[in-house]
């Protein structure tokens, strides 16, 4: 709040109130999503590390453990980003997963705090998609019982950058927008301007991952006209938490747009 509220006052893309509609609910998501996913991730990540340490040769982990920490961090960041990309993309393309992800896309105003407007079970899924490959490749906790800072730093960088790319800021990063994601890049992910523009820009940090998989969209000097989703979403905080866990109305599938062909 100390960083982004002043920035959004002086460099706002759109005029918005600080305590906009849904602000209190987003604070609830902030605290809930800071606690629940960590509790649910402890066992699966511990089991993953335990299993792969017994399946792969010990020499492999000795080699990974001797890698300079900075290089291992950069490789882990890349592996996590690719894993997150596919987890995020599956959230859009698989109807049962979209029911959870639609919670994040339901706000019609986007600012820094919308980053936390996420169903906790979605966070568990996408973080597993990013963290498990890191453990499988020996980039996290390679061969020690001590705390490994690499997965901690990767998660921290992703969290901080997530607040930035959701922020209501008119900033563009010029040529750097091909290297790291900007608010413009991610705001186009939240657009509800029509089928030709949705289901783009799944990466959280590295836009060129989208470029590799044909889902990159970032027009120069242009921003989304509106945000949100056509999928129905419960208005209340508790209702949004429970709705994805209940059967779809009428036994049917939730509304989800078919990903359009990539616009390069």
Image (spheres, helix red, strand yellow):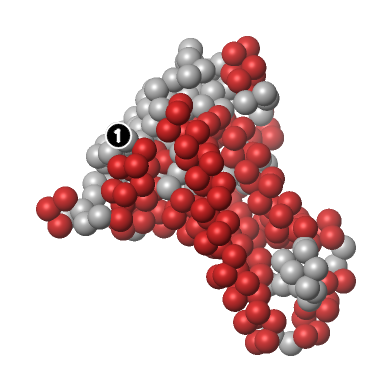
Tell me: 145 left or right of 126. Answer: right
Please identify the residue farthest to the left as the structure is shown: 250
| Label 1 packing within 10 angstroms: few (<14), some (14-19), many (20+) | few
**Residue at figure coordinates x 65%, y 75% from the top left:** 49
Place of residue 11 in the rendered image (x, y in percent of width and height, measured from the top left)? 61, 15
Residue 26 position within the rendered picture, expressed as x and y whole percent measured from the top left:
46, 33
Q: Give the total of numbered labels.
A: 1
Residue 14 place in picture, x, y as percent: 49, 16
Quadrant hosting residue 73: bottom right
Decide which of 131, 145 is in the foreground and name it: 145
Frontmost residue, 122 versus 196: 122
Looking at the image, residue 206 sits to the left or right of residue 108; the answer is right
Label 1 sits on a secondary structure element that is: loop
Q: State whether residue 198 is above or below residue 224.
A: below
Q: Quadrant of the N terminus?
A: top right
Task: Name which residue lies at 54% across and 23% down.
Answer: 168
User: Which residue lies at the image location 30% right of the left edge and 42% below the top edge?
Assistant: 239
Q: Which residue is mark 1?
A: 235
The reply, left or right, for residue 138 in relation to residue 112 is: right
Residue 54 shows up from this direction: yes
**167 is higher (above) or lower (below) than 77:** above
Location of residue 41 with respect to 154 vertically, above or below: below
Q: Residue at x 69, y 45 (%)?
A: 157
One can see residue 136 in this view:
no
Figure quadrant of residue 166: top right
Give the image location of residue 93, x and y in percent.
36, 55
């Amino acid at each position: 709040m100390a960083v982004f509220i002043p920035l959004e006052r002086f460099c706002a893309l759109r005029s918005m109130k600080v305590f906009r509609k849904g602000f209190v609910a987003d604070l609830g998501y902030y605290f809930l999503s800071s606690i629940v996913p960590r509790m649910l991730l402890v066992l699966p990540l511990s089991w993953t590390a335990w299993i792969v340490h017994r399946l792969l040769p010990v020499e492999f982990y000795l080699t990974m453990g001797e890698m300079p920490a900075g290089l291992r961090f950069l490789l882990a960041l890349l592996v996590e980003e690719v894993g997150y990309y596919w987890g995020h993309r599956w959230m859009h393309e698989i109807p049962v997963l979209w029911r959870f992800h639609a919670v994040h896309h339901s706000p019609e105003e986007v600012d820094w705090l919308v980053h936390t407007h996420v169903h906790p079970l979605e966070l568990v899924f996408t973080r597993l998609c990013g963290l498990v490959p890191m453990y499988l490749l020996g980039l996290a906790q390679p061969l020690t019982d001590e705390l490994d800072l690499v997965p901690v730093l990767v998660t921290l960088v992703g969290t901080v950058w997530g607040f930035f790319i959701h922020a209501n800021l008119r900033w563009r990063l010029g040529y750097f927008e091909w290297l790291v994601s900007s608010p413009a890049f991610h705001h186009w992910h939240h657009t509800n301007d029509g089928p030709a523009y949705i289901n783009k820009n799944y990466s959280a940090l590295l836009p060129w991952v989208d470029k590799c998989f044909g889902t990159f969209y970032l027009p120069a000097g242009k921003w989304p006209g509106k945000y949100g989703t056509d999928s129905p979403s419960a208005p209340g905080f508790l209702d949004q938490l429970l709705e994805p866990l209940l059967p779809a109305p009428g036994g049917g599938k939730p509304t989800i747009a078919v990903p359009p062909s990539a616009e390069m």
